[in-house]
Image (cartoon, helix red, strand yellow):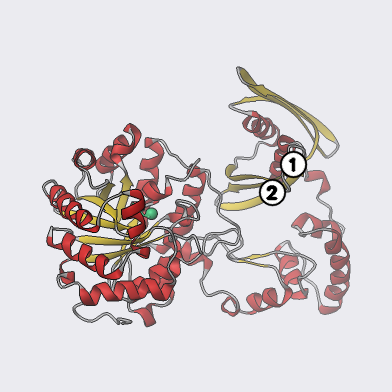
C-alpha cells in the first residue's frame, strides 16, 4: 500500500525530536542542564511537536534536565524514555510532573534476536510486559508512546500482535524502531503498511517511524513509513545519534516541503530556523557536521565546478533545489578553484569592486589559472594581489608561538603576529592550550568573532601524524572558514584561526 492521505488519514506529520535523548547518547555530546534548556528552547522555536528530553532513570542529570525542560517549555509535548519496568516509569512520571503536556515513552524488544539473546524470555512474556507497562504508564499520563525495539528485524505477525496489544492497553502512539538501521525503504514501508492494514485497532493510535542510519537509509526509511501511513517521525538535528545516527530533522522537513505537491504531507517546522538551530547544536554538542551533509553542511550550498558556477550565476535554480535563505543559510558560495570558469571569476571580481570587459576578463583569467593551479582555493586577497592591489599589509602572519600546559598547570600561550611588518606579542591564559592560544590571538587581532566549529583530524594515524584543523568563525552572522595543518596541533590550530581571521 502506498497511501495517499484520505480524509480518514490526517496529513499532518508530527515531528518528534530526540536530539536530547538518542542524540545526546553519543559519546562527547553530553550537555549540562543549562545547555539542554538552550537546545530545548531552540527546538521549541523551530516548531517540533514532541521533545524527548531524556531518560530520567539513567542518571540524576537526565532526571533534572527533564524536570527543568518541563518547567521551561510550553509548546511541544515533553517526552521521557523508560524501559518497561515500574521504577523507570515512576521516575519518568516524577520528572514530567511540571510538563504542560507530558508523554511517557516506554517499550521493550520486539525481535526474536532481542527476545532470546538480550531479554532471554518468550514472545508471550513480552506481550504481557508490554501491556502491563503501557497500563502502568497510563496511570500517570494520558499520552503513552510504546516502542517495539528492533521492530525492523521483528517477525511481522508478532509485531502486529504487539502493536494491537499495546493499543488495547492504552498506547496513543506506537513506535516501530529500525533500531539497527537494517531495513530497506521498501521493507520498512511495507512493514508500516502491513500494520496499518492488519492491526484491528490501528485507528486508535499513531504509528511512529524511528530509524537509524547504519546503512545510510534512515531518512529514506522514515519517508517510506510516512508514505505508508505513519504520522510521526522521530528525528534529531544534524542526524546525530547512536552509531551512524538517526533520521535528520532538517532532511525530513525539507523533503516534506519540497515534495508537498506529491506527498500531500506537512509538518510545522519553521524552516528558516533550521540552519541557526543546526549551528547551535553543533556548537553546544561539539559535534561537527560533515561538510557535504544535506541542508546544513558547509558545502550544501557551495558550488565549485565551472559548469555549475556558471549555471547558478545565471539562475540559482539551475543547480539549487532549495533557496539557502529559506533554511536560514546566509548565501550560496561560489568557491574559486582551478576548476572555476570565467563567469565565477567575473562574479567574484565584481563583488570586490573590479568591473571588466571580455578582453580584460580573458587576460585576468589566464593569471587566475596560474595562481589557482598552485593553490587549492582562491580567496579575495589572492584576487586583490593578482589585480595589483595586494592587501598583504592587512594580513596577519604567525611569527612565534609558545604554549605551556599540563595537569595542574594553567595553560598559557605567547603569540607573536606580524602585520604590515609590525610585530605584536600577547600572552593569554586559557582553560586549555587551544583556548589560551586563541585568546592570545584575539588580544592582538581585536575582532569580535565567535568560534562556531573546531575540528582536528589526524591524517594517517600515529603519534607523529600531521593534524588537520578546520575552524569556522562568525562575525555579524557571516561565516568564515580557516584551515591549518602541522605535526603540532596547537600550531595547526593557530594557523587555522589566523587563516579564518584573515578572511574577515
Ligand atoms: O533505536 C531505538 O530502538 C530506540 C528506542 C529506545 C526508541 O532509540
Ligand atoms: Zn534509537
Question: Does residue 93 appear left or right of residue 413 in this picture?
Answer: left
Disc 1 crowd, CA 10 A, few/some/many (<14, 14-19, 20+) = many
Q: Residue 165's x, y, as percent? A: 16, 62
Question: Does residue 276 appear left or right of residue 49 in this picture?
Answer: right
The residue at the far top in this view is 408
For mark 1, give the secondary structure. helix
Q: Can the viewer see residue 264?
A: yes
Q: Is residue 394 above or below residue 165?
A: above
Residue linked to disc 2: 482
* Image quadrant assignment for residue 394: top right
Res 31 label: none
Does the numbered disc 1 mark a residue whose Cβ is under 8 Å from ligand 2? Answer: no
Q: Residue 125's x, y, as percent? A: 20, 53
Q: Residue 167's x, y, as percent? A: 16, 62
Q: How many marks?
A: 2
Q: As rendered, which of 424 and 215 lies closer to the eye?
A: 215
Q: Can the viewer see residue 77?
A: no
Q: As rendered, which of 83 and 77 lies closer to the eye?
A: 83
Q: Quadrant of ligand 2?
A: bottom left
Q: Residue 247's x, y, as percent? A: 43, 61
Does the numbered disc 2 mark a residue whose Cβ is under 8 Å from ligand 2? Answer: no
Q: Is residue 58 above or below residue 223?
A: above
Q: Residue at x 33, y 62 (%)?
A: 151
Residue linked to disc 1: 495
Query: Do the residues under discs 1 and 2 have CB atoms within 8 angstroms?
Result: yes
Q: As rendered, which of 243 and 29 lies closer to the eye?
A: 243
For mark 2, give the secondary structure. strand
Question: Does residue 32 appear left or right of residue 353 in this picture?
Answer: left
Q: As rendered, which of 200 and 18 lies closer to the eye?
A: 200
Disc 2 crowd, CA 10 A, few/some/many (<14, 14-19, 20+) = many
- Cα distance in 3D space between marks 1 and 2: 8 Å
Amino acid at each position: 500500500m502506498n497511501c495517499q492521505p484520505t480524509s480518514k488519514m490526517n496529513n499532518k506529520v508530527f515531528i518528534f525530536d530526540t536530539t536530547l535523548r538518542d542524540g545526546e547518547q553519543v559519546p562527547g555530546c553530553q550537555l549540562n542542564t543549562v545547555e539542554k534548556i538552550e537546545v530545548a528552547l531552540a527546538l521549541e522555536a523551530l516548531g517540533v511537536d514532541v521533545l524527548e528530553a531524556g531518560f530520567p532513570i539513567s542518571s540524576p542529570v537526565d532526571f533534572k534536565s527533564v524536570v527543568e525542560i518541563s518547567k521551561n517549555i510550553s509548546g511541544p509535548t515533553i517526552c521521557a524514555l523508560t524501559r518497561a519496568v515500574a521504577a523507570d516509569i515512576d521516575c519518568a512520571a516524577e520528572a514530567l510532573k511540571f510538563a504542560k503536556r507530558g508523554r511517557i515513552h516506554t517499550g521493550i524488544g520486539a525481535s526474536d534476536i532481542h527476545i532470546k539473546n538480550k531479554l532471554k524470555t518468550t514472545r508471550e512474556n513480552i506481550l504481557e510486559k508490554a501491556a502491563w507497562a503501557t497500563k502502568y504508564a497510563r496511570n500517570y499520563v494520558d499520552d503513552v508512546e510504546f516502542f517495539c525495539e528492533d521492530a525492523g528485524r521483528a517477525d511481522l505477525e508478532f509485531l502486529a500482535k504487539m502493536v494491537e496489544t499495546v493499543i488495547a492497553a492504552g498506547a496513543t502512539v506506537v513506535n516501530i524502531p529500525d533500531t539497527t538501521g537494517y531495513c530497506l525503504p521498501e521493507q520498512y514501508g511495507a512493514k508500516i503498511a502491513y500494520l496499518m492494514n492488519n492491526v484491528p485497532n490501528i485507528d486508535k493510535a499513531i504509528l511512529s517511524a524511528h530509524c537509524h542510519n547504519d546503512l545510510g537509509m534512515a531518512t529514506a526509511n522514515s519517508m517510506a513509513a510516512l508514505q505508508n501511513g505513519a504520522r510521526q517521525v522521530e528525528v534529531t538535528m544534524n542526524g546525530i545519534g547512536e552509531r551512524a545516527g538517526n533520521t535528520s530533522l532538517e532532511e525530513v522537513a525539507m523533503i516534506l516541503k519540497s515534495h508537498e505537491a506529491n506527498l500531500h504531507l506537512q509538518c510545522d517546522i519553521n524552516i528558516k530556523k533550521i540552519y541557526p538551530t543546526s549551528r547551535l547544536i553543533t556548537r553546544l554538542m561539539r559535534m561537527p557536521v560533515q561538510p557535504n551533509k544535506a541542508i546544513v553542511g558547509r558545502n550544501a550550498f557551495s558550488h565549485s565546478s565551472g559548469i555549475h558556477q556558471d549555471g547558478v550565476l545565471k539562475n540559482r535554480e539551475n543547480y539549487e533545489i532549495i533557496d539557502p535563505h529559506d533554511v536560514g543559510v546566509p548565501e550560496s558560495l561560489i568557491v574559486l578553484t582551478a576548476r572555476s570558469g570565467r563567469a565565477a571569476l567575473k562574479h567574484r571580481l565584481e563583488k570586490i569592486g573590479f568591473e571588466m570587459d571580455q578582453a580584460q576578463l580573458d587576460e585576468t583569467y589566464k593569471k587566475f589559472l596560474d595562481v589557482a593551479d598552485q593553490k587549492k582555493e582562491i580567496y579575495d586577497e589572492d584576487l586583490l594581489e593578482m589585480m595589483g592591489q595586494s592587501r598583504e599589509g592587512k594580513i596577519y602572519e604567525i611569527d612565534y608561538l609558545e604554549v605551556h600546559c599540563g595537569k595542574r598547570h594553567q595553560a598559557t600561550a605567547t603569540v607573536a603576529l606580524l602585520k604590515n611588518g609590525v610585530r605584536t606579542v600577547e600572552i593569554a591564559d586559557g582553560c586549555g592550550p587551544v583556548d589560551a592560544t586563541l585568546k592570545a590571538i584575539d588580544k592582538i587581532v581585536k575582532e569580535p568573532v565567535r568560534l562556531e566549529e573546531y575540528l582536528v583530524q589526524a591524517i594517517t594515524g600515529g603519534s607523529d601524524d600531521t593534524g588537520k584543523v578546520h575552524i569556522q568563525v562568525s562575525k555579524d552572522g557571516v561565516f568564515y572558514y580557516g584551515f591549518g595543518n602541522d605535526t603540532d596541533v596547537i600550531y595547526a590550530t593557530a594557523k587555522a584561526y589566523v587563516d579564518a581571521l584573515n578572511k574577515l
